[in-house]
Amino acid sequence: STTPVNVTVTGAAGQIGYALLFRIASGQLLGPDTPVKLRLLEIPQGVKAAVGIAMELDDCAFGLLAGIDIFDNPTDGFDGANVALLVGARPRTAGMERSDLLTANGGIFAPQGAAINAGAADDIRVLVVGNPANTNALVAAAHAPDVPAERFSAMTRLDHNRALHQLAKKAGADLSDVRRLTIWGNHSATQYPDIFHAEIAGRPAVEVVADQDWLESDFIPTVAKRGAAIIDARGASSAASAANAAIDHVHSWVNGTPEGDWTSAAIVSDGSYGVPAGLISSFPVTSTGGHWQIVPDLEIDAFSRDRIDASVAELIDERDAVSKLGLL
Ligand code: NDP
């Protein structure tokens, strides 16, 4: 039998954690042939609830689940981790300034980066889900100098999946016919969902849809504000779809993206597309052999350029703010 893969999940007792852990344990993260050991990391107040989730995981009798351990400190939580899903984060509460939010999250993601540096497995791959995800990933990576920066990523796959659905619906097409969509920039309201390279059943999406007004007044804001629309409707933030996107992200990273298509992920910039090197920004990406590559040489028109630049400007602001706070 194969050696189990150690998967660390932070914020394991939260609502995304609850939607995520059962899917990991059932084999949907890494595939049906890969046993997993779960390492649940929580803050001390969250440990009791994590114990309850572990009981439920036991009660699923998942054949691939080789063990569950629960921790309240990052040093133990990331020890030997091959995959780490950083879900737990400090939410913004009423009256909180942005610098308070960045400071609070720096206090979470800097020590987690250091613990990953100290004890994670050599092949560690990190996905940050907790917001502000791109900048939290930047902080964690900065505290893990011995881990290649390319092993840190932040999630824009939920935005990508939201955009896929909206575009397929508008075109009256099957989801499987939509390819080469891109989310650029920050996982925030400034993100830019780009259909200019997308195809629907092999035809340029902008020809199939041919509706600039829909693009600007409907598609882009609907994708960017979908999280708020779900809170409004459900009375709670998206959790199952966020967990689904985390599964998709890691699955693509480890198992590769399909020939002729790409996906979106926030990864460290090499300077491509005018995004300053070192920033963690969303790009069109493929994965082969367990490595992301930024899709090269796409033509970016003025409409897209403005929107990419605006989102990247926000990322630069966030980077400068955490840098000022001494977190980089
Ligand atoms: P959720 O599980 O709902 O969300 C966790 C994080 O995911 C939040 O930062 C949230 O951001 C983010 N997120 C990213 N994308 C999405 C999306 N599309 N929809 C919704 N959320 C998204 O939070 P809970 O409060 O239920 O649970 C958090 C858990 O984390 C708690 O159990 C807490 O104890 C734990 N925690 C653990 C830490 C640790 O292990 N060191 C540190 C801090 C907390 P946003 O807030 O912007 O919605």
Image (cartoon, rainbow, N blue to C red):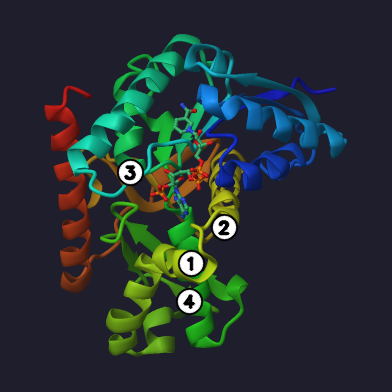
Left or right of 144 on screen, residue 317: left
Cα distance between the residues tagged 2 and 4: 15 Å
Cα distance between the residues tagged 3 and 2: 18 Å
Cα distance between the residues tagged 2 and 1: 10 Å
Mark 2 and mark 3 in contact (Cβ < 8 Å)?
no
Residue placed under numbered mark 3 in the picture: 132
Comes first in the chain, label 3 or label 4: 3
Label 3: how many residues lie within 10 Å, few (<14), some (14-19) or many (20+)? many
Residue placed under numbered mark 4 in the picture: 166
Cα distance between the residues tagged 3 and 4: 24 Å
Residue placed under numbered mark 1 in the picture: 230
Label 4: how many residues lie within 10 Å, few (<14), some (14-19) or many (20+)? some
Left or right of 52 on screen, residue 210: left
Residue placed under numbered mark 2 in the picture: 241
Mark 4 and mark 2 in contact (Cβ < 8 Å)?
no
Label 1: how many residues lie within 10 Å, few (<14), some (14-19) or many (20+)? some
Cα distance between the residues tagged 4 and 1: 15 Å
Q: Amino acid at mark 3?
A: Pro
